Image (cartoon, rainbow, N blue to C red):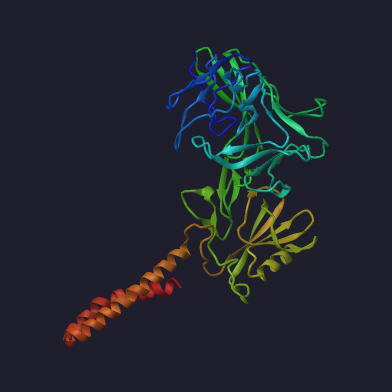
Amino acid sequence: MAKPLDLPLLLIPVMVVTLISVSFAQTNVTSGASVQAIAGAGWSSPSGHFVFGFYATDGGLTVGHNGDGDVAAMRDDGNFVLYAANATVAWSTFAAPTDTLLAGQDLAPGAQLFSSVSATSRATGKYRLTNQLNDGNLVMYPAGTMNVAAAAYWDTGTFQIGFPLTLRLDASGVLYLVGNNGSYTKNLTKASAAQAVEQAHYHRVTLDPDGVLRSYRHGLLSSGGWKTDVEWIGPSDRCHVKGACGFNSYCVLDRDAQPSCLCPPGFDLIDAGDAAGGCTASSGAGECTAGQRADPGSSMATMQNVSWADTPCGVLAAGTRAADCQAACMSDCFCVAALLDTNDGTCTKQQLPLRYGRAGGGYTMFVKTGGAASPALGGGGGGNHHHHRLRRASTVALVCVGLLTFVALVYIRPRWSDIVKIFCCLAPVVFSLLFWEGFSR
């Protein structure tokens, strides 16, 4: 028997299933049966390609849970089912998907898939796929956002269909929407081609931790191993995933179509070792106090053909010239950047944090740079925060030096020659502390 291939968590947060089959053979589990709490232990389907049981996670072990029912069964389609006394299905994992759909499994109207945190942590992650009940549209959003167009980053464009739709994956690998009693269908993917080297092939669709929906093909080779291919992804441009890069940073694709995160002019990475963690302003742009005017030392840098979340703190009507758009932001102390729509000339002033930036999109952004150093943003450390710590440390050190000098003069009463020697020793330290005190202000 081939070794099962572990796949991402399916259907409930505490369940592990492996691979997919199109038959409905099943292994029955009678009332009172138990499984030892060790990684890999569980109830296997007849083919051995699915297991309900324990698997290792970052936090230890996780296991599927039981409900009311007389008999349970691990079926060869990947569904773990609880049967009632009258042989009807009381509960099944197919009815409660988490991040994955198997062949024959539906995402019903109003249901959602949630990504996992990572490949080793099955906790709820940063993204969700929602089958919207009100309009029939299948939409991807960052988790924690509302179902509004401004938060969406991918959809099927079926919002005017007029009736709810069901998302379904068939045994050939076709992912499609179906509704109106089967009279309407829309294919999202194509059927998978057979390969001679495979004894069998299986399919799953998973909303991965990076916010991309992927269709996977798993081929069972004659050698007993498994070959996995990604046959489709949505969105195709991974920089379209909102949240791929942190606050105040923007996403670009490298030569291998992998997303990279960069800081706009006037910003630096919060953590040099984590480019996706976001950026912090390296100038005083947007840091204002009551009655403060725009910093005369500021200037505007230009970023062409970009896209950012448009959450304006001020709007200039269509037809605004680039120079006027820049001037409007320059004259506003709270304005950090301005977005100019190159199609109609609408200019919107933006405050911190800047979100969902990416290369491409048809906007020109003017970013305020220069001016005094500002505190770090987004909870990360920054240069100015370091200066504040230096200033506090230098102040404490100066006070200590002063107290020691006072004690020496009053209680020890050294000779003038000794006082001169003490001053010569302390002078470099005092001058260094005074320098840092002035620098960090």
**Residue at 63% over, 43% down:** 241
**Residue at 63% over, 63% down:** 336
Q: Is residue 264 above or below residue 168?
A: below
Left or right: 365, with 54 as reference point: right
Q: Residue furthest front?
A: 85
Residue 302 in view: yes
Left or right: 66, with 242 as reference point: left
Please count the marks in the image: 0
**Residue at 40% over, 74% down:** 437
Between 65 and 96, the residue placed more toward the observer is 65
- Percent coordinates x, y for residue 382 in the rendering: 47, 60
Between 275 and 74, the residue placed more toward the observer is 74
Left or right: 134, with 279 as reference point: right
- Percent coordinates x, y for residue 11 in the rendering: 60, 30
Which image quarter: residue 86? top right
Left or right: 197, with 339 as reference point: left
Residue 188 in view: no
Which image quarter: residue 19? top right
Q: Is residue 279 above or below residue 78?
A: below
Which image quarter: residue 61? top left
Q: Is residue 309 above or below residue 33?
A: below
- Percent coordinates x, y for residue 104 in the rendering: 67, 22
Between 46 and 83, the residue placed more toward the observer is 83
- Percent coordinates x, y for residue 26 in the rendering: 58, 15
